[in-house]
Image: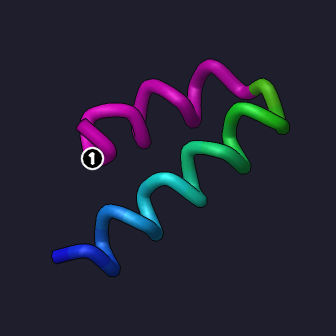
Amino acid sequence: MQTKAVQGMLDFDHVCRRTQPSVVAMVYPFTG
């Protein structure tokens, strides 16, 4: 469970750095 949470945080961080709203919309639900 922790591994998924950590990976989700890393993915979200990458998306934030790329600043791609389209990707954020797809990743955000999974992180939450």
Quadrant for the C terminus in the image: top left
Q: Is residue 14 left or right of residue 17?
A: left
The stretch in magenta equals 20-32
Residue, x 32% and y 62% (percent of image)? 5
Residue, x 82% and y 36% (percent of image)? 17
Name the secondary structure under disc 1: helix
Residue 30 is covered by the magenta coloring: yes
Quick one: 26 or 9, which is closer to the camera? 9
Residue 19, x across and y down, in percent = 78, 25
In terms of image quadrants, where is residue 27? Answer: top left
Residue, x 38% and y 33% (percent of image)? 28
Residue, x 16% and y 76% (percent of image)? 1
Above or below residue 27? Residue 4 is below
Residue 12, x across and y down, in percent = 56, 44
Q: Label 1: how many residues lie within 10 Å, few (<14), some (14-19) or many (20+)?
A: few
Q: Mark 1 = which residue?
A: 30
Q: Is residue 22 left or right of residue 3?
A: right
